[in-house]
Amino acid sequence: MNFPLLILFLLSFSTAWAQTTNGPREVTPEMEKSIKVKIEQDVASFKKRQDGDRAVATEFAIDTMRIERYMDEYMKLDYSTAGMRFAMNEAASAYDVILNKYYKKLLLKLKPSDKTALIQAEKAWIVFKDKDLAFRAVLSKEEYTGGGTIQQVKATSFYYNMIKDRAVTLFQFYQSIESN
């Protein structure tokens, strides 16, 4: 077999193989609905196993379970760069809702004289978050990383983790007050 014929065979084989494998798929509204139904079934099962004494922890666990499961299930279907970034941004937005929920609950629990400390801490965290994300953007430049689409995924993951971590922290503050 001559070399050009071998190259042609290998290219046609690899093209046929690539077209028959299950690659990332665009998530359709029907697929997304199926994901959400599956998650709600898991939530119902989780609720049955919980005791009533831990209502605050159970509520938070369910909120975060919905977010994490949605992100995981979405990325199983669409693990392209765009799909992963979309799923992480959706998760970050959902964690931001939880962050604000526990910020407000915490404010309601604090004495008026102590609310200023939380408000100032949250304002400082927002400034820190914005500056840290800006620095992360600098570090993501091709001259520092070599570039590539992985940098987009890393930046989105960094943002997602910042929001998630702050939501968890505010929940923990709230839970410590609620349990006393």
Image (cartoon, rainbow, N blue to C red):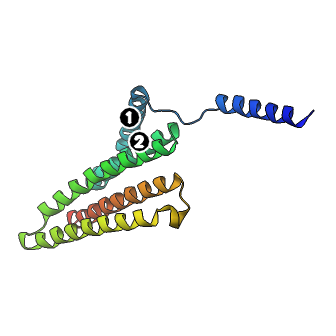
Q: Residue at x 31, y 68 (%)?
A: 131
Q: Residue at x 6, y 69 (%)?
A: 112
Q: Residue at x 45, y 39 (%)?
A: 74
Q: Pointers 1 and 2 in contact (CB under 8 A)?
A: yes
Residue that label 1 marks: 36
Residues packed near mark 2 inside 10 Å, few (<14), some (14 to 19) or many (20 plus) = many
Q: Quadrant of residue 169?
A: bottom left
Q: Position of residue 138 (x, y in %)?
A: 42, 66
Q: Residue at x 28, y 53 (%)?
A: 96
Q: Quadrant of residue 14?
A: top right
Is 117 left or right of 36, judged from the image as shown?
Answer: left
Residue that label 2 marks: 70
Q: How many marks?
A: 2
Q: Position of residue 51 (x, y in %)?
A: 32, 50
Earlier along the polypeptide chain: callout 1 or callout 2? 1
Q: Amino acid at mark 1?
A: Lys
Is 109 left or right of 161, judged from the image as shown?
Answer: left
Q: Label for residue 74?
A: none
Q: Is residue 39 above or below residue 142?
A: above
